[in-house]
Amino acid sequence: MTPEALERAAQLVGDGEYAAAATEFDEALATEPEDPVALLGAARAQLALSRDEKARGLLLRLLLVSPLHPEALSHLAAIRFRRERNPAQLDELRALAAHPEARFPELYNLGVALVRAAAFDEAEGALQSARQLSPDNPFVLAQLGKLALRRGDGARALRDLERAIELAPREWYPLRLLARVHLAAGRLPEARAALDRALERFPDGPILLQERAQVRLALGQPRLALDDARRLDALHPESPQAAYLHGVAALTAGRAPEALEVLERAVRLAPKAAEPRVALARLKGHLGDAVAQQSLLEEACAVAPGLPGPALDLSNLLLRQDTASSLARARDVLETALQRHPEDPGLHLNLALVLRHSAPEQALPHARRAAASPHPGIADEGRRLVALLAPGS
């Protein structure tokens, strides 16, 4: 690779133009397939684009030219750790970072992996060591912000992320993390604003569209959320998550026909997922099709036994039927869910309602657990049941 081409490609990387940089490196490799500089540069560009498989192939080619290349070995171990979460890859990253001549990539990759592994103190050390080698590196600052967020230190997370955003005016990832900091503090408008800015930098970013749609739903902006969800679904029509979000947004926005079509597709795309079935069941119930509603909820409980959401929805439906067989089925569903989620107050409330006539002495402890709930609606209903089951208590 000529010095001029190398400088041009490196400038593109520095400007955040990773796709263009990858093209430059690929053109160099077409004429010099074993050029180590082009191989490493191309791998870095692909990693920045989150294209792990393409980066992996380039790194393996680099190892054929330079078998002990430390940065290549570090990137490969980091890719494997992202996939497998195997402690062996962490040990490999530690060994590479501990080498006396370890450079920024080895330290940074170790720090990122340790944040993922929730080894926060060790991650802090690795990232600070990387920062010493590159004091104003926005990627290190972003990871330090993420680490602070994971530790519950919102003030430090804001400080590091705002600095990372200032230093990297084309990068979207620090803005996504900033949105998460605001969400953790309940600042929904600020979270949406951060995601707006991130989408200016990465207009079709799937995770950004997904998260902004969710924030817009939480802000009571279902039509705007639906715009994002439609866009995400159009970009990724085979994604069950995109179809599910599209369906929920359409349902919330009052577009029942659209929601019905999309949620049915989401169920087909995710045959072993409970959430699309629960959402479709709610729509079927809203449309007056109680038979389809119950069938979908039974399927949801079958594919995710013990999950509170489907168990609560199905038990609510069975409680309204109020027959011996429906109450027996509701009891079975709720007891199965409570085995896995023994602290869920909604499950305790519904089980108390199921048992209040047939076994009031068994219903009382569940009613008391519901009465102690931090959720006012559940607590009020729980106290009412306690008063009925144990007058004067």
Image (tube, helix red, strand yellow):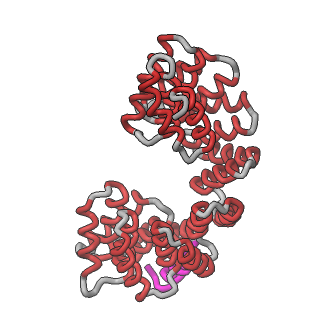
On the image, the x and y values in percent for residue 264 come to: 59, 28
How would you classify the magenta stretch by its main secondary structure? helix
On the image, the x and y values in percent for residue 231 come to: 67, 47
The magenta stretch spans which residues? 1-16
On the image, the x and y values in percent for residue 295 come to: 53, 19
On the image, the x and y values in percent for residue 200 come to: 69, 64
Please tell me whether residue 31 is drawn above or below residue 236 in the rendered image: below
Q: In screen coordinates, is 371 left or right of 251?
A: left
> Which image quarter holds the N terminus?
bottom left
Please tell me whether residue 13 is drawn above or below residue 363 in the rendered image: below
- What is the count of numbered marks? 0
Instruction: Name the image quarter holding residue 294.
Output: top right
- Residue 330 within the magenta-colored segment of the rendering: no
Instruction: Name the image quarter holding residue 77.
Output: bottom left
| Residue at the extreme top | 324
Q: Residue at x 59, y 68 (%)?
A: 178
Q: Residue at x 54, y 42 (%)?
A: 241
Residue toward you, 114 or 26: 114
| Residue at the extreme front | 392
Can you see residue 267? no
Residue toward you, 51 or 258: 258
Can you see residue 323? yes
Q: Residue at x 52, y 36 (%)?
A: 346
Please tell me whether residue 209 is drawn above or below residue 351 in the rendered image: below
Q: Residue at x 49, y 68 (%)?
A: 152
- Residue 8 within the magenta-colored segment of the rendering: yes
Q: In screen coordinates, is 52 left or right of 122?
A: right
Residue toward you, 28 or 336: 336
